[in-house]
Image (cartoon, helix red, strand yellow):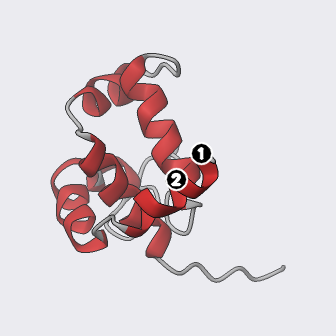
Amino acid sequence: MSLVFASVAATAADAGAGRKLAAAQCNLCHGANGVATMAEAPNLAGQNEIYLAQQLRNFRSGKRTHEVMGVIAKSLSDADVDNLSSWFSSIKVQVEQP
């Protein structure tokens, strides 16, 4: 039942709003295209939307800890979390084997 709810919530997200929010709060570390600009920051482009949303909620609740992300996530509403997750998951990533 919760997977159905998560899918419905994810569909209602606004990737455009997430893109705008990411430009204001995420791009410094995670890059404008979701590819990290800092070695210790993960790439977010192409990540699974449900996974991204859950991790942001974990940072917000304190279940997952990180000095910077804990502060940033606390300011995010549920809609912000869904929109950011929608934006980063919508970025297409091409993988090439060496």
Q: Position of residue 61 (x, y in %)?
A: 40, 20
User: Disc 2 marks which residue?
Assistant: 6
Disc 2 residue type? Answer: Ala
Q: Residues within 10 Å of mark 1 (few under 14, many from 20)?
A: few
Between 44 and 76, the residue placed more toward the observer is 76
Is 51 placed left or right of 77 in the picture?
A: right
Report which quarter residue 31 is drawn in: bottom left
Q: Secondary structure at mark 1?
A: helix
User: Which image quarter holds the C terminus?
Assistant: bottom right
Q: Is residue 17 above or below residue 54?
A: below
Report which quarter residue 84 is drawn in: bottom left
Instruction: Indicate which disc residue 2 carries.
Output: 1
Disc 1 residue type? Answer: Ser
Is 10 placed left or right of 73 in the picture?
A: right
Callout 2–callout 1 Cβ contact below 8 Å: yes
Residue farthest right in this picture: 98
Between 63 and 96, the residue placed more toward the observer is 63
Q: Is residue 78 above or below residue 82?
A: above
Q: Position of residue 15 (x, y in %)?
A: 31, 71
Cα gap from disc 2 to disc 1, whole angstroms: 6 Å
Q: Position of residue 71 (x, y in %)?
A: 27, 24
Q: Is residue 14 above or below residue 96?
A: above
Between 66 and 86, the residue placed more toward the observer is 86
Residue 84 seen by the camera: yes
The residue that appears at 43% across and 47% down in the rendered structure is 38
Report which quarter residue 16 is drawn in: bottom left
Q: Secondary structure at mark 2?
A: helix
Q: Residues within 10 Å of mark 2 (few under 14, many from 20)?
A: some
Q: Position of residue 36 (x, y in %)?
A: 45, 56
